[in-house]
Image (tube, rainbow, N blue to C red):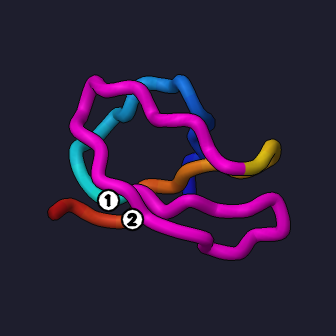
Amino acid sequence: MQKLTSGQIAPWTGEYSVISRNGRTVGTIHVNKGDRLPPTQSDGDHFEYSSKK
């Protein structure tokens, strides 16, 4: 699974899981391809693409 961080460009349109530094899913967001991923609530969090919606 590709880990993406805040500020990176979303490679696909769809749902992205917000993953905490300890590996737990703490939320999901919808992002369109080409948009920047938003800031996370905690340092060390990242995004992983989960599905098209």
Q: Residues within 10 Å of mark 2 (few under 14, many from 20)?
A: some
Q: Where does the magenta region start and end? A: 16-41
Q: Is residue 42 left or right of residue 40?
A: right
Q: Residue at x 58, y 36 (%)?
A: 39
Is 40 inside the magenta-drawn segment? yes
Is 26 inside the magenta-drawn segment? yes
x and y percentages locating residue 29 in the rendered image? 38, 56
Q: Residue at x 51, y 68 (%)?
A: 27
Q: Is residue 4 above or below residue 42?
A: above
Identified by mark 1, the residue type is Glu
x and y percentages locating residue 34 in the rendered image? 27, 24
Q: Quadrant of the C terminus?
A: bottom left
x and y percentages locating residue 35 in the rendered image? 31, 26
Numbered disc in front, either 2 or 1 = 1
Label 2 vs 1, first from the N-terminus: 1
Q: Are marks 2 and 1 in contact (CB under 8 Å)?
A: yes
Q: Is residue 29 above or below residue 34?
A: below
What residue occupies the far bottom of the structure in this picture?
24
Disc 2 versus disc 1: distance between alpha carbons?
Answer: 6 Å
Q: Residue at x 51, y 25 (%)?
A: 8
SS of the residue under disc 1: strand
Q: Is residue 52 left or right of residue 31?
A: left
Identified by mark 2, the residue type is Ser
**Residue position marked by numbered label 2 in the rendering:** 50
**Residue position marked by numbered label 1 in the rendering:** 15
SS of the residue under disc 2: strand
